[in-house]
Amino acid sequence: MRRLLGLVLVLWPAASMAEVNVLASAGKWQAFSAPAGRLSVCGLRSQDGSAGFTLAYIPGTWDFEILVTDARWPPDAARGASVVVHMLPHGPWRAPGEAYPLPSGAAAVRVAVDANSLEPFVDQFRNSTEMQVRLEPGGHAWRAETSGTEAVGAAFVDCLRGAR
């Protein structure tokens, strides 16, 4: 299951519009659903040039995954790093990340987070003004404004409820 979700996250930017259903948009954020074999993925996504953030969850699984990419991160920068996601004004989320290089030469980090943390994570997302994602130690922060994402968060929650 984890391998399937990882594949969905890596292929998401290249997925055709026929495969991905955008449920809601606000600024650079989207809530989406996409088929993953016989299952359905519910997710949140933001893309800003060469950097991106994707959160995806297959309802009924044990964890959700976050994929963070940034062309400014050299491939080795993410190796062994922890990921810190900070949704202002709330406290930070920390998790070990699995790093791998992208074909573009940039780095990507995939983080698995316990599904019991999904609801608090989404609540903070919906009630935040900015998301910052950085690698520790020493990585620069990727930032995305989250003001006005209440509808995106609500569409994501609706997707989860409908897929259960």
Image (spheres, rainbow, N blue to C red):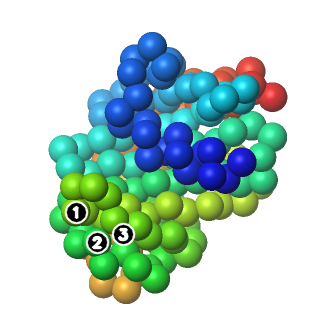
**How many C-alpha atoms fall within 10 Å of the one at disc 1: few (<14), some, or many (≥20)?**
some
Q: Amino acid type of disc 3? A: Arg
Q: Residue at x 63, y 52 (%)?
A: 3
| Discs 2/3, front | 2
Q: CA distance from mark 1 to mark 3?
A: 18 Å
Q: CA distance from mark 1 to mark 2?
A: 6 Å
Say which residue label 2 marks: 75
Instruction: Let me know if residue 155 appears in the view.
Output: yes
Instruction: Let me know if residue 120 appears in the view.
Output: no
Left or right of residue 7: residue 10: left
Q: Position of residue 141 (x, y in %)?
A: 29, 67
Q: Is residue 39 above or below residue 75?
A: above
Q: Position of residue 140 (x, y in %)?
A: 25, 72
Asked which secondary structure carries label 1, the reply is: loop
Q: Amino acid type of disc 1? A: Gly
Left or right of residue 57: residue 86: left
Answer with mark 2 or mark 3, whichever residue precedes in sequence.
Answer: 2
**How many C-alpha atoms fall within 10 Å of the one at disc 2: few (<14), some, or many (≥20)?**
some
Say which residue label 1 marks: 105
Furthest residue toward bottom = 137
Say which residue label 3 marks: 134
Question: CB atoms at circles 1 and 2 under 8 Å apart?
Answer: yes
Asked which secondary structure carries label 3, the reply is: strand
Q: Position of residue 38 (x, y in %)?
A: 72, 26
**Frontmost residue, 151 versus 6:** 6
